[in-house]
């Protein structure tokens, strides 16, 4: 076989996986409102088309950034940096910008402009409406050489701040990269959050035999997916840094379906990455995590008895441990979908990984990871609204999380209240997970794919679902076009309402369902 030619082969797999606490865009927009039974077509978007088209669109937006800043009446010291461009089928263009002030990055200063086909500015979505202005850009506290000067506009009055990154190891062995924002005048910590976004823990065999796209190389084959941006899967060999070795094979038949064969974990990771890529492409017309046609990569066999998996922006990669027995890799399908979707969130709304925005970040990964599971149509791991349903992390066969009634896991919130933002992001995510379930399937008792659900509402109301396909289109469009880094639950309600209006119309059943589902989880 010719070297480097892409090939497909069935790989025997009944992978052993594990999961701890599991841890961009909606592109479907129509020129005309749809009837309740219609499914919107995918948006025409430089961000989800070819890499060259996306690059050209961002370059064009950047060339107009000064005039855009003037039109938005930004201050003389403020500049805009174009980050992404999405074009809807009706010609509406959504351009996402970061902001600088006196040359310093403004954290929480991101915004999205929404421009009609005729070039007229329709509206703008801002992470903050506060005026960006500070009396001085010289810190009054001692500055570490590695600290970066920034403007903090994440909440309240914008101030000069110092951003530092502290690295280390978390209690469970996960790498730690804690980002700390400190007021440069008072020394007060303004925000602190863990950048390494983790997934879950437990044991399961789930995917059976799967097809992989591999690449012929020399006399054998390698786990390089030329059909999906060149995604590669590496074996870290129990290391905790670098990429390790690209996984290779002599005969293009990979793994034996058990944790005794090191290839099995690589098969699962490679398969999960492919299914997630295909879901983004099929559902949203999105070409890869960042919409630029470039793949992330996967690393398996991380650490010794490491019971977790995580996404890391700095390497643009997914990493999976082998579980407590070093034979139960954390490479289940919904874990892969969850982790890759952290990268998608980072490439779109870039939701801060703390407070309510952190819960929305985690929920986005649960929502899209669940959607990947349904999309894959895998007979061994059928789609459901349970997170980690096959891994027995609790030792009694129960799943890690429940989307129909999140509190059944003992920690997640079913409904919003003023203290939700104080919860760990994996538990505050329950409000959005519950919203998504209600929007998809509705309230009350029902059985889906053999699983029984019974979803309550905060006010005892009855919610009629619109179907998962429409629900995920609404969520993705809200994420990619209307959410910003500081979006909270009230903002998320507004964002999804705008998305539903764009997709289905101002008098649509879908918009009414969005309102009903948010009310059902006490976001009003």
Image (spheres, helix red, strand yellow):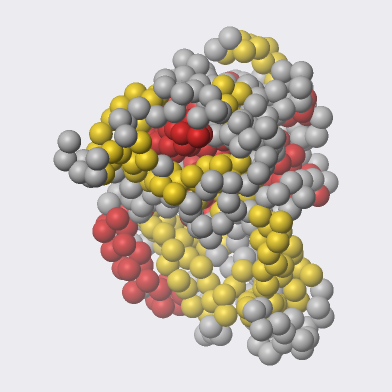
In the foreground, 42 or 229: 229
For the point 47% across and 65% down, the residue is: 97
For the point 46% across and 34% down, the residue is: 263
Q: Is residue 253 above or below residue 74?
A: above
Question: On the picture, is 151 further left or further right than 483?
Answer: right
Question: On the picture, is 116 further left or further right than 333?
Answer: left
Residue 243, image x, y percentages: 48, 53
Residue 300, image x, y percentages: 52, 42
In the foreground, 496 or 287: 287
Residue 76 visible, this angle: yes
The quarter of the picture where residue 56 lies is: bottom left
For the point 63% across and 47% down, the residue is: 303
Residue 519 visible, this angle: no
For the point 75% across and 74% down, the residue is: 182
User: Which quadrant: the C terminus?
Assistant: top right
In the foreground, 56 or 269: 269
Residue 467, image x, y percentages: 51, 23
Residue 55, image x, y percentages: 31, 62
Give the number of callouts: 0
The quarter of the picture where residue 227 lies is: top left
Q: Is residue 172 above or below residue 80?
A: above
In the foreground, 329 or 123: 329
């Amino acid at each position: 076989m010719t070297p480097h030619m892409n090939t497909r082969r069935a790989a025997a797999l009944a992978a052993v996986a594990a999961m701890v606490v599991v841890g961009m865009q909606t592109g479907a927009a129509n020129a005309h409102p749809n009837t309740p039974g219609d499914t919107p077509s995918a948006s025409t978007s430089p961000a989800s088309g070819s890499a060259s088209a996306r690059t050209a669109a961002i370059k064009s937006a950047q060339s107009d950034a000064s005039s855009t800043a003037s039109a938005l009446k930004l201050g003389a010291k403020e500049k805009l940096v174009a980050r992404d461009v999405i074009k809807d089928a009706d010609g509406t263009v959504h351009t996402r910008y970061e902001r600088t002030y006196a040359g310093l990055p403004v954290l929480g200063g991101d915004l999205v402009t929404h421009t009609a086909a005729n070039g007229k500015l329709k509206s703008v979505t801002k992470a903050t409406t506060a005026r960006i202005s500070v009396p001085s850009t010289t810190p009054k506290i001692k500055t570490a050489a590695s600290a970066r000067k920034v403007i903090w506009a994440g909440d309240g009055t914008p101030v000069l701040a110092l951003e530092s990154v502290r690295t280390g190891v978390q209690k469970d062995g996960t790498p730690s990269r804690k980002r700390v924002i400190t007021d440069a005048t008072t020394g007060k910590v303004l925000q602190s959050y863990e950048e390494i976004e983790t997934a879950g823990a437990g044991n399961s065999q789930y995917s059976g035999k799967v097809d992989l796209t591999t690449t012929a190389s020399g006399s054998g084959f390698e786990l390089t997916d030329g059909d999906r941006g060149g995604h590669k899967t590496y074996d870290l060999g129990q290391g905790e840094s670098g990429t390790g070795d690209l996984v290779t094979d002599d005969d293009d038949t990979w793994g034996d379906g058990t944790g005794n064969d090191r290839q099995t974990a690589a098969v699962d990771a490679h398969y999960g990455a492919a299914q997630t890529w295909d879901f983004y492409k099929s559902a949203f017309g999105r070409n890869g995590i960042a919409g630029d046609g470039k793949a992330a990569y996967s690393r398996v066999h991380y650490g010794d008895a490491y019971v977790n998996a995580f996404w890391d922006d700095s390497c643009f990669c997914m990493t999976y441990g082998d579980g407590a027995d070093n034979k139960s890799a954390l490479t289940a399908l919904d874990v892969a979908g969850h982790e890759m979707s952290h990268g998608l969130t980072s490439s779109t709304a870039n939701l801060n990984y703390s407070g309510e925005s952190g819960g929305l970040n985690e929920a986005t990964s649960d929502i899209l990871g669940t959607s990947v599971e349904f999309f894959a149509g895998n007979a061994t791991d059928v789609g459901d609204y349970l997170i980690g349903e096959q891994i027995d992390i609790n030792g009694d066969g129960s799943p890690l999380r429940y989307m129909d009634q999140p509190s059944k896991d003992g920690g997640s919130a079913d409904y919003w209240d003023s203290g939700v933002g104080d919860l760990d992001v994996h538990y505050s995510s329950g409000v959005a997970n519950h919203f998504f379930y209600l929007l998809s399937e509705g309230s009350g008792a029902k059985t889906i794919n053999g699983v029984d659900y019974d979803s309550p509402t905060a006010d005892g109301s009855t919610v009629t679902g619109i179907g998962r396909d429409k629900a995920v289109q609404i969520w993705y469009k809200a994420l990619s076009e209307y959410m910003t880094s500081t979006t909270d639950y009230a903002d998320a309600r507004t964002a999804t309402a705008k998305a539903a209006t764009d997709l289905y119309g101002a008098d649509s059943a879908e918009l009414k369902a969005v309102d009903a589902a948010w009310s059902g989880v006490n976001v009003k």
